[in-house]
């Protein structure tokens, strides 16, 4: 299993500012994933973060808006840049160990942009 | 490609009612199947899983059986409680390296006393 600590758990931010979300895992993992969950919606994958290389972004998400760092095998950050109210969502980090194993999730960051 | 389709919600049931949430999948290869639950204000937690055909996953009174012939993994519970009110996500994982899970859209369940 994996225990993931994600912070902040929630924040209210002014439009035009940026917020960095941190995700700490209690063991080394190769892949970490960042998701967005808009109100009442399912999870949408933002990007996959590998240690030592640039993150791979899904269609509709760009590095300038959602820069990701992955400095080591237990930590990653996602920044939501130049925020607008449309960025109000829950952001979740996740890890899995590949193959047919389950994924583990942080508790999420509930972001409200005003 | 790989995809998961689950029944649209919201689902509202009375306490002690029987619950079924349908989930079907499309996958290349032999996926593992999962149900995750998201309680209000929280992240996702694994509820149960099944890794091969005819496996039954179970936890907290919930069950789901991996049916390869119908490509389904329906979630069931015989008697729901108010505390089961949450959003339920069906998901699959394929043995193709480090790829993320594929999720269904989620089904919101509300159980009323």
Image: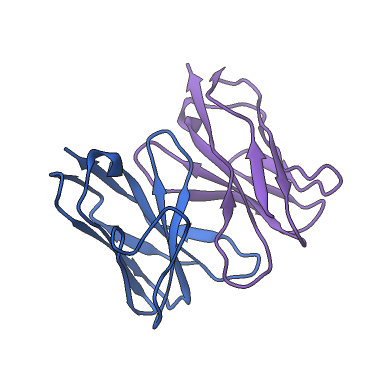
Chain colours: A blue, B purple
Q: Nearer the viewer, residue B11 or A44?
A: A44
- In the displayed image of the protein, which residue is found farthest to the right? B69
Q: Residue at x 46, y 31 (%)?
A: B83
* Quadrant location, the N terminus of chain B: bottom right
**Left or right side of B98 for A78:** left
Q: Residue at x 47, y 16 (%)?
A: B113
User: Up-down: is A49 above or below B82?
Assistant: below
Q: Nearer the viewer, residue A102 or A85?
A: A85
- In the displayed image of the protein, which residue is found farthest to the bottom? A52
Q: Is residue B3 visible?
A: yes
Q: Position of residue A60 (x, y in %)?
A: 43, 53
Q: Quadrant of residue A6?
A: bottom left
**Left or right side of B51 for A51:** left
Q: Position of residue B100 (x, y in %)?
A: 55, 61
Q: Residue at x 59, y 28 (%)?
A: B8
Q: Is residue B50 visible?
A: no
**Left or right side of B57 for A52:** left
User: Up-down: is B36 above or below B61?
Assistant: below
Q: Position of residue B61 (x, y in %)?
A: 62, 38
Q: Nearer the viewer, residue B36 or B26?
A: B26
Q: Nearer the viewer, residue A79 or B107?
A: A79
Tally of marks:
0
Q: Position of residue B112 (x, y in %)?
A: 48, 17
Q: Quadrant of residue A98?
A: bottom right
């Amino acid at each position: 299993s994996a225990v993931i600590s994600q912070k902040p758990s929630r924040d209210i931010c002014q439009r035009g500012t940026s917020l960095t979300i941190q995700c700490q895992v209690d063991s080394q993992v190769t892949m970490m994933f960042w998701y967005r969950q808009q109100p009442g919606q399912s999870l949408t994958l933002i990007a996959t973060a590998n240690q030592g290389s640039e993150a791979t972004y899904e269609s509709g998400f760009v590095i300038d808006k959602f820069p990701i760092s992955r400095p080591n095998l237990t930590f990653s950050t996602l920044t939501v840049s130049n925020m607008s109210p449309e960025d109000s969502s829950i952001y979740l980090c996740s890890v899995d160990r590949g193959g047919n194993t389950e994924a583990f999730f942080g508790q999420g960051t509930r972001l409200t942009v005003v | 490609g790989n995809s998961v389709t689950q029944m649209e919600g919201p689902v509202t049931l009375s306490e002690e009612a029987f619950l079924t949430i349908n989930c079907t999948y499309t996958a290349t290869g032999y996926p593992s199947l999962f149900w995750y639950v998201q309680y209000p204000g929280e992240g996702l937690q694994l509820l149960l899983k099944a890794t091969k055909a005819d496996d039954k996953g179970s936890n907290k009174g919930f069950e789901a059986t991996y049916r390869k012939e119908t490509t389904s993994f329906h979630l069931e519970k015989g008697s729901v409680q108010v505390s089961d009110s949450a959003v339920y996500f069906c998901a699959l994982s394929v043995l193709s390296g480090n790829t993320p899970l594929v999720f269904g859209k989620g089904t919101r369940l509300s159980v009323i006393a």
